[in-house]
Image: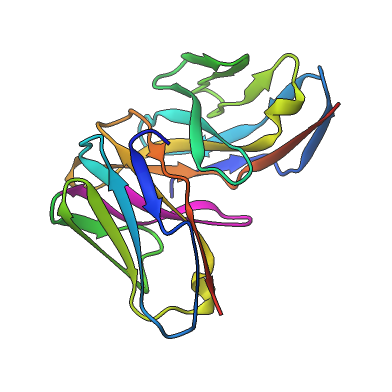
Amino acid sequence: DAGITQSPRHKVTETGTPVTLRCHQTENHRYMYWYRQDPGHGLRLIHYSYGVKDTDKGEVSDGYSVSRSKTEDFLLTLESATSSQTSVYFCAISEMDRAGYTFGSGTRLTVV
Amino acid sequence: GDSVTQMEGPVTLSEEAFLTINCTYTATGYPSLFWYVQYPGEGLQLLLKATKADDKGSNKGFEATYRKETTSFHLEKGSVQVSDSAVYFCALILPLGGSARQLTFGSGTQLTVLP
C-alpha cells in the first residue's frame, strides 16, 4: 500500500510475552489507527492517534497500549499476549475527516 | 449505538451475473458511507464512497447510492468477473475525540465468482 508499511508481517509468540507491532507512514497524515480483524466481526478499532503523543482508546482496547512519538510511527504493544489476541492487525492512516482511510497490508499474529 | 449491518455471506455467482450486497446502517447524525474491498492476503482498499444523501459512489463498475430514507448503501455491479472475488466491507464514519473519525465496519461479505 502506498506510503504505509506494517512490521512484522507475521509473528508467532508465546502466551505472556510482550509484543510490539509497528506502523510506519510516509504520507505525513495526522490520523493513525490500529484495527484487529476477526472472522464474523469485521474490523474493530483498538486505539487511534490524532497527533504526536495524542492517542485514545477504541472499542477493544483492553490488553493493548499504543505510542506515537513521531508523526510517521504508531506502535501497538501487547504487554502480555493472550490467545484471544490471535488476530490480523491492520494499521490505517487518514488525512482529514470523511476522507476514508488507507490501510497497511496487515500483521498476522498468533499467540500460542 | 451506531452500527453497520451487511448481508451474510458467502455469496457465489457465475461470471457476468448481477451482484447486490445489502448494507444498512444505524447512526445519529449524517455519516459518510464507504465500501472497502479486501483481496486475499491483502489490506483493505477503498472501493467507493458517498458523503451525503442521494450521492452515488462508483468505481470499477461498482455502484452504491446513499439512501437516507431507508438508511441503506447497497453495493451493485451489473456483470461480475472472476477478479472481483474478494471480501467486501460496508463502513461508516463516526466522530471521535480530538477531531478524529472512526470507521465502523460491517462484518464483511465474501464474494466468489466462478468462471
- The residue lying at 63 percent from left, 14 percent from top is B61
Q: Quadrant of the N terminus of chain A?
A: top left
Count of labels in the image: 0
Q: Residue at x 25, y 38 (%)?
A: A26
- Image position of A3 (left or right of B100): right
Q: Give the residues drawn in magenta, as a range.
A: A33-51
Depth check: A70 or B31 in front? A70
Q: Position of residue A59 (x, y in %)?
A: 39, 59
Residue B100 shown left or right of residue B64 in the figure? left
Q: Is residue B39 above or below residue B32?
A: below
Q: Which residue is at the far bottom?
A: A16
> x, y percentage for residue A103?
42, 41
The location of residue B108, given as percent across then percent down, is 61, 43
Q: Where residue A66 sits: x, y (%)?
A: 26, 63
Corner quadrant of residue A77: bottom left
According to the image, what is the colour scheme of the structure? rainbow
The answer to which of A16 and A10 lies nearer the viewer is A10
Residue at figure coordinates x 32%, y 52% from the top left: A23
Magenta stretch: helix, strand or loop mostly: strand
Whether residue B113 is situated above or below residue A49 in the rendered picture: above
Please say whether residue A104 is one of the residues in the magenta stretch.
no
Residue at the spot x=43%, y=78% of the render? A81
Whether residue B110 sits left or right of residue A73 in the image: it is right
Considering only vertical position in the picture, is B4 above or below A7? above
Task: Residue A75: name its quadrant.
Answer: bottom left
Quadrant holding the C terminus of chain A:
bottom right
Horizontally, is A73 left or right of A18 in the view? Answer: left
